[in-house]
Image (cartoon, rainbow, N blue to C red):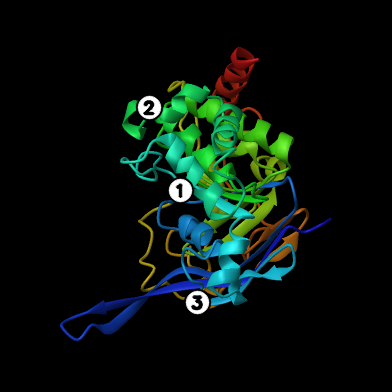
Amino acid sequence: MTELLRVQNLTKHFPVKRGLLRRQVGTVQAVTDVSFTLAPGETLAVVGESGCGKSTLGRAILRLHEPSSGEIRLDGEDVTALDTRDLREARKRMQIIFQDPYGSLNPRMTVRETLAEPLLLHGMATPANIRAKVDELITMCGLSAWHADRYPHEFSGGQRQRVGIARALATRPRLIVCDEPVSALDVSVQAQIVNLLQDLQRQLGLAYVFISHDLGVVRHIANRVAVMYLGRIVEQADTEELFLNPRHPYTRTLISSAPRPDPTVARHKLPVEGGTPSAMALPSGCAFHPRCPMAVDRCRAERPELRQLGGTLVACHRADEAVEGMDVAAAGKDSPALLRRLEILEQARTMQA
């Protein structure tokens, strides 16, 4: 399989400084030793609780956060070794769609000015043809050309996110990091944006790193899923394999915790107690062991490494053991919450067609 992106042992730690002398008193281990590959036209979803390091990972890939260590290769080129000039050139090939479509747009610039800026900066348009280029971009994302002369506050949330997508497409990238691109939108609008992203992927051959906590959206859009917990990937598999046969107790917890529209349907959630530990003081051994009902002494003393188990990469000493009380249906095709979300997405696609 041809690789577009290779992330190898990527780590991003943030120093914590306090006092008048700004002395370092600790370190936030946001992302630690993360590795994966991404092929052209593929979507890798990154899921996990808030604070697990998903967004930091996405920004580190683009060097919006400078990695502490590790290697990022785009089309074989080491992005982490590029100087400022070469990095600007590389950023034509990798862009980001932000979670907040309003906060990511300059309120004092019209959409036309916002979209024209990267085109002119990278020499991809001239003053003579810039208007036509912008009109093409905005039309591609489902808006009319006359929308380009409006300001961000004149759009709805879904329309603003379409502008954000157009902004990411301006330089004709091959890789787009989608950082929670639909979490701030209504469900019906989410479906439209997800379908737009899929249509653009087919047309332009885009690859996505899709960061989300919405498992229904993830199952609809992703080819593979990586589950993060406290800065590390604890499970990675093809989408259907992960939902039908989750191996890590944390993955099982995420899937079984998906809300169900029918409160009368019996459910058996995997019992998990306590909150997420601080990224400044990680537990010994497996970071999930203080909350894991399967934890044994080995889990508390020895951190598990990712290993191949069937078609899954999983970091758990007991991943190949059965879990009593796990609601397997919640992980598979009979999950009402996931089925309902997929139904809404499909309805929106039908309406658009």
Q: Position of residue 98 (x, y in %)?
A: 45, 46
Q: Residues within 10 Å of mark 3 (few under 14, many from 20)?
A: some
Q: What residue type is disc 2 on?
A: Phe
Which residue sits furthest left?
Answer: 20
Is tag 1's residue or tag 2's residue first in the polypeptide sequence? Answer: 2
Residue nearest the viewer, comparing 39 with 240 = 39
- Is residue 292 shown to the viewer in this render? no
SS at circle 1: loop
Can you identify the residue that label 1 sits on? 271
Residue nearest the viewer, comparing 106 with 28 = 106
Can you identify the residue that label 3 sits on? 68
Which residue sits furthest front?
Answer: 128
Can you identify the residue that label 2 sits on? 155
Q: Nearer the viewer, mark 1 or mark 3?
A: 3
Task: Please identify the quarter of the rendering in which residue 223 is found.
Answer: top right
For marks 1 and 3, give the CA distance: 35 Å
